[in-house]
Amino acid sequence: DYAATEDLSFMLAAMNGTDNTDYNITGNVVLGGQIGFKGQYLNLIYGNSGAGDQFQIDYTGGFDLSDAFYVGINASYN
């Protein structure tokens, strides 16, 4: 995890596939990364998750429409 500025961050990871919740029986590892900017995050993973190659990109964040209303977004492409 690296904070380039107060608003901009970067993260790299080597991890189990996203569907391996309890343990990793295949021993495969996927690579992941995240770029964060002002509360908006772009996440990527790539690798062999045990069921073949996997590429996934995901956006999480949101916007204030007013002082009382916030719209959260979580969109993913696999």
Image (cartoon, rainbow, N blue to C red):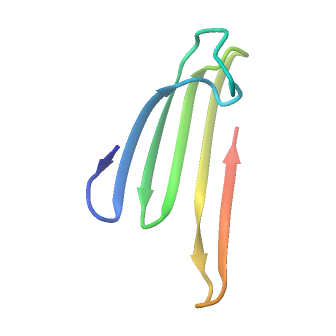
| Residue 55 spot, x, y in % from top left | 62, 31
Q: Quadrant of residue 62?
A: bottom right
The N terminus sits in image quarter: top left
Nearer the observer, 77 or 33: 33
Q: Residue furthest bottom?
A: 67
Residue 30: percent from left, percent from top: 54, 23
Residue 64 drawn above or below residue 26:
below
Residue ranking furthest to the front: 22
- 65 relative to 46, above or below: below
Residue drawn 61% across the image and 47% down it = 58
Which quadrant would residue 49 be assigned to in this image? top right
Query: Among all residues in the image, which is located at the extreme left?
Result: 4
Please report the residue visible at 49 percent of the width from the left and 33 percent of the height from the top: 32
* Outermost residue, top side: 26
- Between 20 and 51, which is closer to the camera in this rendering? 20
Residue that appears at 69% across and 28% down: 21
How many tags in the picture? 0
Q: In the drawing, does residue 13 fall left or right of residue 52?
A: left
Question: Residue 70 location, x and y as percent?
Answer: 64, 79
Most foreground residue, 13 or 75: 13
Q: Which of these two is toward me, 16 or 56?
A: 16
Location of residue 72 by image quarter: bottom right
If the image is split into quadrants, where does the C terminus sit?
top right
Left or right, 51 with respect to 30, comes to: right
Indicate whether 52 appears above or below 4.
above
Q: In screen coordinates, is 31 left or right of 57?
A: left
Please tell me which residue is depicted at 56% across the width and 28% down the height of the picture.
Answer: 46
Q: In the image, is residue 43 above or below residue 74?
A: above
